[in-house]
Image: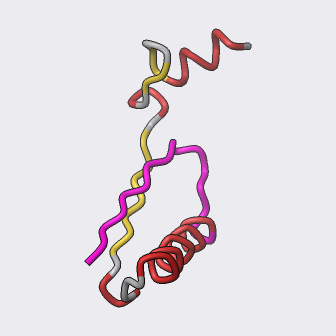
Amino acid sequence: MPYVNIKVTDEGVTVEQKSRLIKGVTDLLRDVLGKDPASTFVVIDEVPLTDWGVGGMNVAEWRARKS
């Protein structure tokens, strides 16, 4: 019973994109590991930019400094 947790920043990921991610990951686990799609769980968490860190700062700050 695979469980996959995908974390993305909350920057407008659409329902269609999420559906494609869920289907793609489920298909990959079926094709590579022979896992039953009926028992494969995929969870997508959208994380605010201020809660995602890179380079010692949140992504919003990091991007501002890179500009």
Image coords of residue 21 (percent x, y)? 55, 67
Name the residue furthest top.
65
What residue span does the magenta drawing correspond to?
Answer: 1-16
- In this rendering, would 12 be left or right of 31? right
Name the residue furthest left.
1
Image coords of residue 59 (percent x, y)? 52, 24
- In this rendering, would 63 be left or right of 34? right
- In this rendering, would 47 be left or right of 66? left
Image coords of residue 5 (percent x, y)? 36, 58
Count up the numbered dots: 0
Q: Quadrant of the N terminus?
A: bottom left
Q: Nearer the viewer, residue 12 or 59?
A: 59
Q: Nearer the viewer, residue 28 or 65?
A: 28
Q: Residue 57, relative to residue 43: is it above or below?
A: above
Q: Judge whether residue 4 is colored magenta.
A: yes
Name the residue furthest front.
33
Q: Residue 22, relative to residue 53: is it above or below?
A: below
Figure quadrant of residue 50: top left
Q: Which residue sits at x=30%, y=85%?
A: 39
Q: Judge whether residue 56 is colored magenta.
A: no
Figure quadrant of residue 15: bottom right
Question: Tell me, what colour scheme is on the image?
Answer: secondary structure
Image coords of residue 37 (percent x, y)? 40, 87
Q: Which residue sits at x=49%, y=47%?
A: 8
Q: Which residue sits at x=74%, y=13%?
A: 67
Figure quadrant of residue 2: bottom left
- In this rendering, would 19 be left or right of 6? right
